[in-house]
Image (cartoon, grey):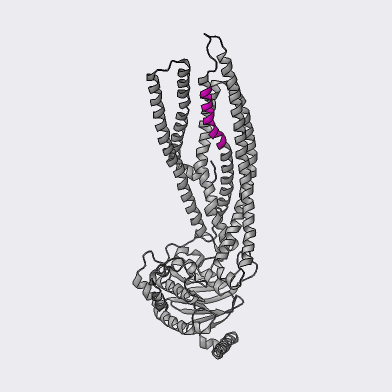
Amino acid sequence: MIFGKHVNKFYIRYGFFFLLGIAALITVDYVQLLIPDVTGSIIEGIEEATLTKAQLIIFMKQLGLWAMIIVFGRFFWRIFIMGTSRRIDYDLRNDLFSHSEKLSQRFYQENKSGALMAYFTNDLEAVRMAFGPGLMMFFDVLFLGGLAFYKMYQLDVVLTLFALIPLLMVSIMSAFVSRITGRKFKARQKAYEEMSDFTQENFYGISVIKAFVNEVREMREFAKINKNNYDKSVSHIKASTLMHVAIEMFITMIRIIMIAIGGYLVYKTIGIESGNPAKFSIGDLTRYIAYFGTMVWPMMAVGRLINMRAQAKASLQRISSLLDQPIDIEDGPQTIKPFEIQGKIVFNNLTFRYPGSRAEILKDISFTIEAGESVGIIGRTGSGKTTIVDLLLRLFNLRPNEILIDDVDLMKLPIKSIRDAIGYVPQDNFIFSDTIKNNIGFSSDEPDLDVIIEMAKYSDVHDNIIDFPSGYDTIVGERGVTLSGGQKQRVSIARALLKDPKILIMDDSFSAVDTKTEEMILSSLYKLRQGKTTIIIAHRISTIKQSDKIVVIEDGKLIAIGKHEELMESSPFYQQLVLQQQLEDEIEGVE
């Protein structure tokens, strides 16, 4: 049994099921200890030649009844204890996933996904084992072991006290070894995290590894990490096995003590003159051996239970560390609910640095986007363009009134309302391992195929999709591996358009398509987005040339704003960007 603020609720939630399971388990334990009495009476009857056929039939009926009770009792305690542990595993996994979705970008920048997966696999399994087999072992040790010891004590005090000495040694040794196994289990989990993270990263980057012919180097690196995982796992298993071997050794010692002393007591009893009552008969020795055989499992379970609890405790600490991670981005007490966004955006002296960094990414940015405007944002790589849209999506917290939507402080708006109102086409164009249809219809629970096809046509990807053998039902593979870069971008655009948002943000969404395709998509886009706010971040002038307003960012500062024609006259920086791209286009044309 383990306790902690994130698991204590399960004892209350599933307490009734646990009680039913424990009751069935105790019933089985009690009935098990009735069997040695019957077998001892049968042997005594045979020894004394007093056992009749009628008595034997009664004994057999009793044994048959108890066997049935044990069978059904074990079935029920497995359902109520083991089954409930699976429910706890399910609930705790949901808690982990739900909390993980609420964590900020900062957390995922600081923690690798491969390491986080260990929480959902090995750690949850260790906690589940504590609630299932661990709980069963605890009550078996307590009741089966306790009742068996009481029965043995009733038969012979001296023999039982001799058997108790190794048991005390087992308890002392188990407490000592459990600390060692707990530390080794944590080290094993850490090694597993490193291996999982390395493997996941290599699978994602397999094309790069092959392109640079670095397979052998990566294999050598993996061999080192795998060897570390192997060494830590073997070290943990050795410590666990040492405990089990030691317990087996002490159990064997008890057997020897029991047989030697018990045999001597029987020998003395046989030597008593006729007419005196027997002190320790063959039937008693049979009962004693049977009780001891019943007690072997609880004795072995002590070591397993201590080891299992140490592992579960270590895993629960790791799981709790994730569940205790603060949720940085959440609605505050001043949140205005409900709120329907129309699309006006005001940046008011926006200055921002990422958490934990001293460098200012954005510096005193101020401009206004009217509802229904199309706005282009342009600037060199690393100038802070993507950071602006990240802040619009409330991926980070801001100071009061730095960004206003519809003249209301962004920090006072419900996060759900903000993100419901925004359609986003990110730079990485993340595609889920699903059908093209479900990827485009991601924003809808039951997307209409006709609407999906219409959005695909707007983003100029329909013809590519129908060329696939399965069309819109094509599974694109992990991260859209079966799609080209341009197809991924256009599927991402279709996905955002289908949402029909009040505000559409396109972050460098045309970098993988040619200029002709870009012109076709933009032409359709401006028609479709009439009266709705559209923000396009780009490196190419051609992408944002037709925008109602162009914002020029350099080194986190706003250095110019206006239409294309206005900027060509007033902004030397913008003129330089235009000239550079014209030269690049001419060079490409010559080549």
Judged by its main secondary structure, the magenta piece is helix
Q: Position of residue 225 (x, y in %)?
A: 63, 58
Residue 369 appears in the picture as rendered: no
Horizontally, residue 330 falls left or right of residue 459, namely: right
Q: Nearer the viewer, residue 172 or 13?
A: 172
Q: Position of residue 94 (x, y in %)?
A: 47, 53
Q: Is residue 287 found inside the magenta-colored segment of the image?
A: yes
Q: Is residue 374 found inside the magenta-colored segment of the image?
A: no
Give the extent of the magenta segment. 285-301
Horizontally, residue 352 falls left or right of residue 36, namely: right
Residue at 44%, 80% in the rendered image: 521
Rendered view: 326 above or below 278: below
Q: Nearer the viewer, residue 398 or 79?
A: 79
Quadrant into which the C terminus falls = bottom right
Residue at 53%, 59% in the rendered image: 103
Residue 217 appears in the picture as rendered: yes
Q: Quadrant of residue 68?
A: top left
Q: Position of residue 490 (x, y in %)?
A: 45, 75
Q: Quadrant of residue 530?
A: bottom left
Rendered view: 224 above or below 9: below
Q: Position of residue 358 (x, y in %)?
A: 65, 67
